[in-house]
Structure formats: C-alpha cells, structure tokens
Amino acid sequence: DAKTTQPPSMDCAEGRAANLPCNHSTISGNEYVYWYRQIHSQGPQYIIHGLKNNETNEMASLIITEDRKSSTLILPHATLRDTAVYYCIVRARANAGGTSYGKLTFGQGTILTVHP
Amino acid sequence: DVKVTQSSRYLVKRTGEKVFLECVQDMDHENMFWYRQDPGLGLRLIYFSYDVKMKEKGDIPEGYSVSREKKERFSLILESASTNQTSMYLCASSQQGRDQPQHFGDGTRLSIL
C-alpha cells in the first residue's frame, strides 16, 4: 500500500471549515483513499473514502486531485467534538487470501484541535 | 448505523491466564478483524476472518487464536497471557467487496499483570 504524509497537527476555529491535507504521491491506479479519525480512548471511526472522484457524505467531503497524488478532507463546520487524530490511508483493493487482505495501516495522522 | 460491540472496555488479567475478548457486529458483515494498537507502533493486524469458521493470520498472530462460529461474532483468545500483550485491542468488520470500509468497535484496553 502507498505511503501517506500528513501534517502532524492543525488548529481550527469552531464553526469554520477544517481542511486536512494528505500527500500520497506513490498511489497506484487501484488504490483507494480512506479517512478515519480517532478520538482519545475510542476506536477509529470511518469517515469517507474515494478512488478518483470527489465524495461527500453527512460527515465530510473528500477532494482528490486529478493526478491522485494528494487529497483533502473537509469538515465543513468544525465543532469541538471533531477534535481527534485524523488518519489518511491508501489501500489497494482487497485480494482473495493472503495477509494483505483488508489490512489497514495507520500512519501518525494529524492531530486536529478545534478551539472555541 | 454500523455497530461493532466489544465485550469489555477495560480488562485486567494475570500472566498465564487464558483471556477471551469478544466482538459482535450487527450489520451482517462477512469480514471481521482483530487489531492491536500500541503507541509508536500504530495498528497491527492479528487475525481476520472472511466467513464463518474461516480465519487467516495477520502480521502478529503469535500467542493468539481466534474463533468464528457465527457470522456476527469473532472472538480473540490469548492462550497464555503475557505482559507484552498489554495493549488496546480493536475489532472491526466490513462487508465483502473490494473497497468496503472497516468499522471499528470502541476497543478493549487490556492490562496483563
């Protein structure tokens, strides 16, 4: 799976949009971009994923550049409860059999702090 | 909403004990996973299962076994607990399908004394 690079920390004011960047310059054609977040002492929470088109759901938007080498997670109106570590993961489509099947590998992530 | 429930949030056991961690999902997912998460080491896959009674080793299966007798339940067993198995254990599940995301439980923080 391709390696990702994220800034170690970011701040955002409550009510403003939080834009979290992720670089994945070695991504290959069959690899998806996934975003998860983890609030202290809880399990990771799935946010959104995409292949090449921009995606939006009730939690966030995912913007993937045309060359697919980077992406941005957008939380449109950040709240204090969005303070968490955000992980960008690039993962190939799962194969049948083998230990790589479905495995997620989290990097260091971005610590997002939303302040009043 | 997907619900993955782990039986305990916190657990304290003694060295040499046999420890059972239970995980139940309510979304009829085919795939289930056990990970452990340690500071500085990130998330590491212990075992996964893609069907009832089927299991595959992950990256760190030593000292662990699993059981999947029913589709909704995936158990992790520490055969003889050791202090280096003190960790946060996370269960996840996903639908069959090449891009389906995994959904996690809240984790069990296990301490082996």
Image: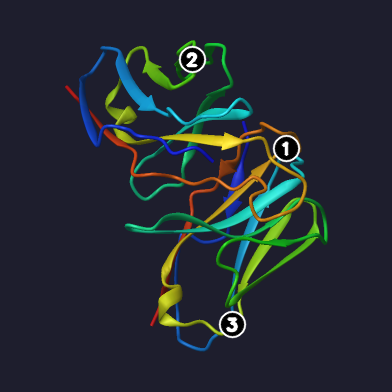
Position of the N terminus of chain A by quadrant: top right
Q: CA distance from mark 3 to mark 1?
A: 30 Å
Question: Dot 2 corresponds to which residue?
Answer: A67
**What is the secondary structure assignment of the residue under circle 2?**
loop
Mark 3: few, some, or many residues within 10 Å (few <14, many ≥20)? few
Q: Can you give x and y, in whole percent of width and height, for residue A69 in the image?
A: 44, 22
Task: Give A35 or A7, whichever is nearer the viewer.
Answer: A7
Subunit ID for the residue under disc 3: B
Q: Nearer the viewer, mark 2 or mark 1?
A: 2
Q: CA distance from mark 2 to mark 1?
A: 29 Å
Question: Dot 1 corresponds to which residue?
Answer: B95
Q: Amino acid at mark 2?
A: Asp
Q: Quadrant of residue B20?
A: bottom right
Marks 3/1 in contact by CB < 8 Å: the verdict is no
Position of the C terminus of chain A by quadrant: top left
Question: Dot 3 corresponds to which residue?
Answer: B18
Marks 2/1 in contact by CB < 8 Å: the verdict is no
Residue ID at (52%, 25%): A48
Q: Can you give x and y, in whole percent of width and height, for residue B105 in the image?
A: 54, 48
Q: Amino acid at mark 1?
A: Gln
Q: CA distance from mark 2 to mark 3?
A: 50 Å
Q: Quadrant of residue B12?
A: bottom left
Residue ID at (33%, 28%): A82
| Side of A1 relative to B110 (left or right) | right
**What is the secondary structure assignment of the residue under circle 3?**
loop
